[in-house]
Amino acid sequence: MGSSPHRGGSPMRRVGWEVKKTRNFNQPQIKNASTMHDVNQCLVRQPDGNIALQEDFKQSLAAFANNLNKVARMLVSRLFTEQERLNGNCTGTRGQNRLDPVRLQLLKSTIFEVCGIGNIEQNEAWKATKSAVDASNRSLRFTYNHSNQK
């Protein structure tokens, strides 16, 4: 008799803020923003002047709610243009511009809502989110720099 790697349990395991799960090919794909027009397509202006994500876009993120880092990477690629990401990070350190604080706050609140992050966990979750966003931006810069060297 062979043994199952999951032994009847869930195919997920918690690793820090990320839950590893078997790949689901039925999950929706979210397109990256190239221009501010692309960014604005997923946003709505509220009566009080604040911006919010369109509900259908937020619902598409729910498929990834068990993976905070993935939701963060997907949101940053949709809320910021490629040019903003190439030249920025969350804090504006290391010679980079700071990403727009209003959209960063929207990213933060959306992650807490979509991933079900409670008040007690929010500080640690936000640190993990900023790390994921900055790593995603560094990866984009690396890819961009190496594709232009050919």
Image (cartoon, rainbow, N blue to C red):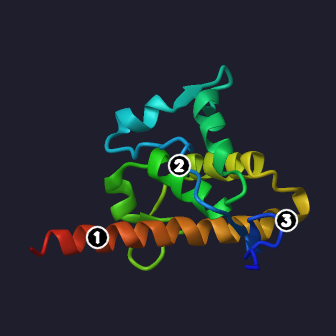
Classify 150 as above or below 39.
below
Query: Residue type at mark 1?
Result: Thr
Q: Are marks 2 and 1 in contact (CB under 8 Å)?
A: no
What residue would you read off at disc 1?
143
Left or right of 22 on screen, residue 19: right
Q: Where does the image place residue 67, in percent across and percent down from the top left?
A: 67, 60
Determine whether, in the image, residue 64 is placed left or right of residue 145.
right
SS of the residue under disc 3:
helix
Q: CA distance from mark 3 to mark 2?
A: 30 Å
Residue placed under numbered mark 3 in the picture: 121
Task: Kindly state the secondary structure of the residue where label 1 is placed.
Answer: helix
Residue 86 image-quadrant placement:
bottom left
Amino acid type of the residue tagged 2 in the rendering: Phe
- First-in-chain label (2 vs 1): 2
**Mark 2 vs mark 1: in front:** 2
Please give the residue where the numbered disc 2 appears in the rendered image.
Answer: 25
User: Depth check: 20 or 31 in front?
Assistant: 20
Which SS class for mark 2?
loop
Between the C-alphas of marks 2 and 1, the distance is: 25 Å
Between 1 and 10, the one nearer to me in the picture: 1
Q: Which tag, 3 or 2, sits closer to the chain's start?
A: 2
Seen from the viewer's position, the closer of residues 103 and 142 is 142
Nearest the eye: 25 or 63: 25
Q: Is residue 145 left or right of residue 103?
A: left
Neighbour class for label 1 at 10 Å: few (<14), some, many (≥20)?
A: few
Picture layout, residue 41 above or below residue 135: above
At a point 53% along the width and 31% down the height, the residue shown is 43
